[in-house]
Amino acid sequence: QVIDLTSGQRFGVNTGLVFPQGSAIKVAILVELFRQADRGELRLSEPVVIRGEDAVGGSGYLRHFLDGASSLSLHDLAVMMITISDNMATNLLIERVGMQNVNRTMAELGVPQTKLQRRMIRPEESRRGNENLSTPAEAAELMARIYRCELPMSPTLCRELRDILEIPHAGPIADALPGNITVGQKTGTITGVAVNWGYIDLPDRPYVIAAMGNYGDSARIQESIRDVTAAVHAYFRRLQ
């Protein structure tokens, strides 16, 4: 799904199909974290003790921290969740904000098929097919709302949320674009699946792209996402 943020035009292929999301669902967790901060239900500076019992596999560094000897703020956990996709940081944030609250907020934002159904790295749930879900249309809509700051929070907090998404980190969308363009993005990969949600702040012609693939080789799907992104960007450069 592609959204032209200037004209509002949308175009895409199979935009209503539901895909497993892997780590891309972390965008929904980030939105809920900042929504609760806006309502005073938590403080982004609130410290969380890093405990060995919370360690999980996958990307990340927190599992290497000394048990109970350090803490990070909710804000800093969010940075690690988005930029290096730290799964331990993600699970700590899910515990703090509540899975049901994430899903309630997504429904209120008009993206009800975007669902957080389990914590990160739960092989037994994956075997049962209990995955975190979204569609290209809904992922693109959520990224458009983030770009426009059409979220249940103050413009100041929305800007802080965007700052986290815009910290440079690798992903098929960012990798296909010139390095001087601001990109807010999150990737997700699990066996046979690759997805990438992003907004591209092209001067005078910003746009959103959400691309997803399933039942294939994850590396080849990521290559396809890069190819699609390059083609879409060429189109918007001409409009620019």
Image (tube, rainbow, N blue to C red):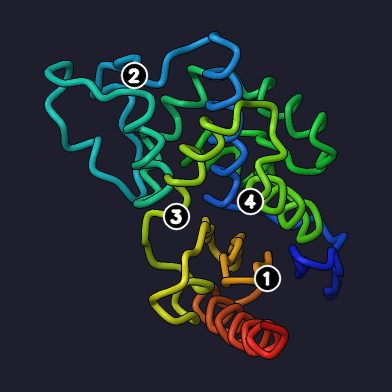
Query: Residue at position x 44%, y 55% from top?
Result: 166
Mark 3 lies on residue: 166
Marks 3 & 4, CB-CB < 8 Å contact: no
Mark 4 lies on residue: 147
Reply above or below: 233 against 205.
below
Q: Which marked residue is nearer to the observer: mark 3 or mark 1?
A: 3
Q: Amino acid at mark 3?
A: Glu
Reply above or below: 57 against 117.
below
> How far across and down, in percent of the image, does residue 49 sit?
26, 16
Mark 1 lies on residue: 213
Asked if one can make out residue 223 in the rendered structure from this viewpoint, the answer is yes
Q: CA distance from mark 3 to mark 2?
A: 20 Å
Q: Amino acid at mark 1?
A: Gly
Where residue 237 sits, quadrant-wise, is bottom right
Marks 3 & 2, CB-CB < 8 Å contact: no
Q: Is residue 225 left or right of residue 180?
A: right
In the picture as drawn, the residue positioned furthest to the front comes out as 204
Q: Is residue 59 left or right of residue 196?
A: left
